[in-house]
Image (tube, rainbow, N blue to C red):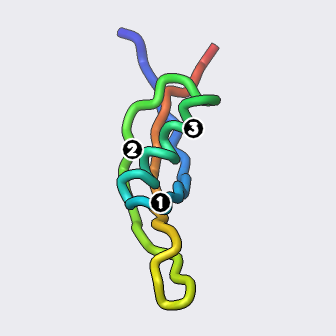
Amino acid sequence: MTESIYKIIELVGTSTVSWEDAAKNAVEAAGKSLKDLRIADVTKMDMKIDNGKVAAYRTRVSLSFKYDLS
């Protein structure tokens, strides 16, 4: 049986559209440099407010990926 190790990192994605888009942006950006992404867990959502209006959505994501043991 092959054993696997996974690393978990925390990222914050941003978007002017939605929390979902912010999470997607974080995962897709990580996917450009990390291999074998596994699970993304949304841990927090908040908004940046500017002059009483929502300026940006922010989503904090815990992202796991397979750790290369070679």
Could you say which disc has been placed on residue 30 in the image?
3
Category of crowding for the residue at label 1, using alpha-carbon neighbours closer than 10 angstroms: few (below 14), some (14–19), many (at least 20) = many
Residue at 40% across / 66% down in the picture? 44
As rendered, which of 57 and 10 lies closer to the eye?
57
Using the numbered discs, state the Cα–Cα distance from disc 3 to disc 1 in whole angstroms: 13 Å
- Counting residues from the N terminus, which is met first, the one under dot 3 or under dot 1? 3
For residue 14, above or below residue 70: below
Which amino acid type corresponds to the residue marked 1 in the rendered image? Answer: Arg
Label of residue 40 in the image: 2
- Total numbered circles: 3
> Of marks 2 and 3, which one's residue comes earlier in the chain?
3
| Residue under pointer 1 | 60
Quick one: SS at disc 2?
strand
Mark 2, Cα crowd under 10 Å, few <14 / some 14-19 / many 20+, is: many
**SS at circle 1:** strand
Taking 10 as reference, is 59 left or right? Answer: left
Instruction: Provide residue 12's location: percent of width, then percent of height.
Output: 54, 57
Inspect the image, locate mark 3, and give the three-letter code of the amino acid beneath it: Ala
Q: Amino acid at mark 2?
A: Ala
Of residues 55 and 31, the one nearer the viewer is: 55
